[in-house]
Image (tube, rainbow, N blue to C red):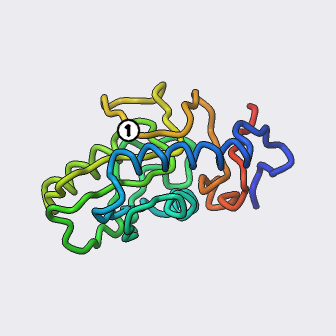
Amino acid sequence: MLDRKVEDLKILFSKEEIENKIIELADKINKDFGTKDDLTLVCVLKGSSIFCCDLSKHLKMPVQMEFIRVSSYGNTQTSSGHVQAMDLTLPNLENKNVLIVEDIIDTGCTMQFLIDMLCRTHKPKNLKVVTVLNKKIARKIPIEPDYYGFEVDDKFVVGYGLDYEGYMRNLPYIGYFEN
């Protein structure tokens, strides 16, 4: 049983704020990639699945969606700094436009792992990163996403794909628990 309840959450970013930010991010991505060449979204499961689907609805180019699964959290509230690759199965992405879609970048370890892996094994023509949340305060590896929705400080956040022990991903907003 969870020791934290939805009722205890403080809303950090509302459903409306998230929806508006997704449109803004999609506009930037459409401008940068254009509308003619296809774009492969590499969605990092499970946390970015909702964001990836919502973002894709606003992209103007032909989009292919692929899904990979890595973890650096397990059931804890902080990143372990160790990336566990659970499923990295992808089609050939050589000379393709690729956008990694993530829910949160904190230490940077997972994102660095993914960028290195994709560049080494797939050699995309263009590789960029989009994330809902950018947690610079936790950064251990100096990496910056090409696009991000919101900057967040050192809070443990849940909702809109982000979970607490596997739960609360379904919330339409992003919230946090006060200690």
Q: Quadrant of residue 41?
A: bottom left
Q: Say what amino acid the circle numbered 1 marks.
A: Pro
Give the residue drawn at x 50%, y 45%: 25
Q: Is residue 50 something that shows in the picture?
A: yes
Give the residue drawn at x 55%, y 56%: 51
Q: Circle 1: is it few (<14), some (14-19), or many (20+) Cα within 10 Å?
A: some
Is 53 situated left or right of 155 in this image?
A: left
Give the x, y percent position of residue 71.
42, 56
Position of the C terminus, as image quadrant, is top right
- In the image, 1 versus 100, the foreground residue is 100
Give the x, y percent position of residue 63.
39, 68
Instruction: Tell me: residue 160, above or below residue 65.
Output: above
Give the residue drawn at x 42%, y 40%: 147
Q: Is residue 66 something that shows in the picture?
A: no
Give the x, y percent position of residue 44.
42, 59
Give the x, y percent position of residue 113.
27, 49
Give the residue drawn at x 69%, y 61%: 170
Instruction: Tell me: residue 113, above or below residue 142.
Output: below
Give the mark count: 1
- In the image, 12 versus 176, the foreground residue is 12
Q: SS of the residue at dot 1?
A: loop
Is 151 situated left or right of 147 in this image?
A: right
Q: Which residue is mark 1?
A: 145
Position of the N terminus, as image quadrant, is bottom right
